[in-house]
Amino acid sequence: MKAINGIKATLLLTGILGVSLPLFACPDMQGTYKIENAQTQLYLQKSGADTYKVLLDIPTYSLMEKKASPVIDKDRQENTYQMPLPDCTLHIEGFGYLMPFTKGTVYHLHFDSQDYEKTIKTDFVLKLSDSPDGVMGATKTGSALPAKVIEALGKK
């Protein structure tokens, strides 16, 4: 009986708030990420309830600061030719999307009238564009940020 009441309460809460439940279960995205097949590091620092400061450390480029925020449900489902963006996806302004992903799962992509598949071997995906080269695995290497990153984000 408790389980049924719990399910009813969950459904009622979902209906009242008008949001899907996975939004409440999103992982803490703050931390350091290494992008597969690259020397690129991505750093996220929580700067508000739903916002992050992002620092991109790409070899041969100066450090780039961006902002990130969660993608709303309407925008997640909008792209009809690509896989919908999963719950808990962050939009990095002017750069792309960082999204949780199930390691070992195939990522389906439609580009230039062709279908592509890529097996992702990480727990996150960095999607820079709708091209096959613009979808890369990302590994969260830690929740803490290096001192140089905290200092750089504090100056801006």
Image (tube, rainbow, N blue to C red):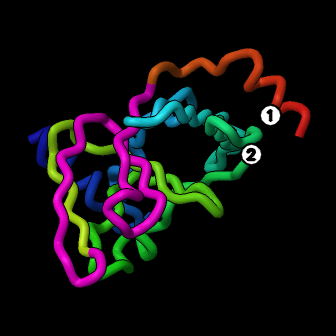
- Dot 1: element: helix
Side of 33 relative to 102 (left or right):
right
Q: Which residues are magenta?
A: 111-140
Position in image of residue 45 (x %, y %): 66, 34
Residue carrying label 1? 153
The kind of residue on which mark 2 rests is: Glu
Q: Amino acid at mark 1?
A: Leu
Relative to 147, does residue 132 appear above or below in the rendering? below
Up-down relation of residue 12 to residue 27 (above or below): below
- x 74%, y 45%: residue: 65
Q: List x then y, in percent, for residue 115.
A: 17, 72
At which x and y percent is residue 154? 86, 31
Give the side of residue 73 with respect to residue 81, left or right.
Answer: right
**Around disc 2, counting alpha carbons within 10 Å, would you say few (fewer than 14), some (14 to 19), or many (20 or more)?**
some
Residue farthest left in this picture:
1
- Residue 111 is labelled as none
Verify whether residue 123 appears in magenta: yes
Q: Is residue 63 left or right of residue 98?
A: right
Query: Which SS class for mark 2?
Result: strand
Marked residue nearer the N-terminal end (2 or 1): 2
Residue at the location (19% across, 77% down)? 114
- Residue situated in front as seen by the camera: 57 or 122: 57
Residue 65 bears which disc, if any?
Answer: 2
Residues tagged 2 and 1 counted as in contact (Cβ below 8 A): yes
Residue 113 in the image, given as x and y percentages of width and height: 23, 84
